[in-house]
Amino acid sequence: VCIVPIDSEKKKCMLETVISYNKKIVEALSEEMFDVVHVNDWFGVMAANRLKECFKTPFVFTVHSLEYMRHGTESREKCDLDSLENLGIKNSDAVITVSKLMKNEIVEKFDAEPEKIFAVHNGFSVPESRSDFGYIREKHNTGSDKIVLYIGRLQKQKGVEYLIKAAKDILRKRPDTTFVIAGFGIFENSLKKFAEIMGISNKIIFAGKIGNEELLPYYASADIFVSPSLWEPFGLTITEAMSQKTPVIATEKTGAVEDMEDGKDVIKVNSRSSSAIASAVLRLLNDEKLAKEIGDNGYEYCIKNFSWEKCSKKTLEVYELV
């Protein structure tokens, strides 16, 4: 393995920064020899495209997400980054993406060739043991309340406001519930204000950024994990929660659960629907046997179907194909 550092100089706008960065990549690799150029998302697309032209080297483009998804919109937006995504999708020899959901989006929104797009799920890390069940209770003093957990960025794509709105309805029927929202982002203050307006800020804990060493204890000590995302190309937080046998509620636009059985391995809900989230949470809170079964089944599904070994093997197959 040879790592080549590339200095990134911040320009007036994002596109100028990206152009400068890509020029430096091409300059740094002008004397190198390689068999495949592989780029993740749009950051190095221009460099990869140039290297392909110069050296006739196959170009593989991995799309983890698309910019309109990150912005929480329903349709592809015309912008500079959209143009870079289009360049990578059209000019690459193969596109790897993290789910069939993402493959379908790329084909539909970019009029791409389905046969050159390969869905390769992310892996699943099996923990050595279950983590501390009481971690959240001790850290945040939640007493005997049931704990509903969200972990992730606090941005529009993640749909956390729908979980907070659902919390209002859930608390009417199950006041013995505390909602823990862990993570940070540009929507943090707005979400806190929304909780205040809803009159439930005393039952919602904004835990802020949590360290990697805390992740599994958080998942393990939650009764339910909710992923309310508007778009979730894969959703590593979902498999992390499942690694602790915590039952998961996720929106239907989530790659990780696309082949899981609803009501058996996971509870699937419509995106942008606080009422659907509320119903699903109450269903699990009121049926502990079902909650345990879904937690166990989700864990077994991930072990059987997701692994980093499978992910790397499929990626290697794409390299060999191009």
Image (spheres, helix red, strand yellow):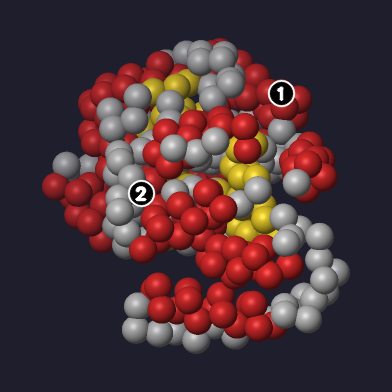
265 vs 35, left or right, is: left
| Nearest to N terminus: mark 1 or mark 2 | 2
Residue sitting nearer the eye, 85 or 135: 85
Residue 129 appearing in the image:
no
Q: Dot 1: within a 10 Å radius of its alpha carbon, few (fewer than 14), some, or many (20 or more) residues?
A: some
276 vs 146, left or right, is: left
* Residue for badge 1: 300
Q: Amino acid at mark 1?
A: Glu
Residue 125 vs 71, above or below: the answer is: above
| x and y, in percent, of residue 314 in the image | 77, 39
Residue 275 vs 34, above or below: the answer is: above
SS label for mark 1? helix
SS label for mark 2? helix
- Quarter where residue 213 is shown: bottom right
Q: Residue at x 44, y 84 (%)?
A: 10
70 vs 212, left or right, is: left
- Gap in Å between the C-alphas at discs 1 and 2? 33 Å
- Quarter where residue 203 is shown: top left
Query: Residue extending furthest left?
Result: 197
Residue sitting nearer the eye, 147 or 82: 82
Q: Residue at x 63, y 59 (%)?
A: 39
| x and y, in percent, of residue 83 in the image | 40, 58
Q: Dot 2: within a 10 Å radius of its alpha carbon, few (fewer than 14), some, or many (20 or more) residues?
A: some
Residue 62 appearing in the image:
yes
Q: Nearer the viewer, mark 1 or mark 2?
A: 2
Q: Which mark is residue 68?
A: 2
Residue sitting nearer the eye, 267 or 19: 19
Q: Amino acid at mark 2?
A: Tyr
| x and y, in percent, of residue 26 in the image | 64, 77
Residue 4 vs 172, above or below: the answer is: below
176 vs 306, left or right, is: left
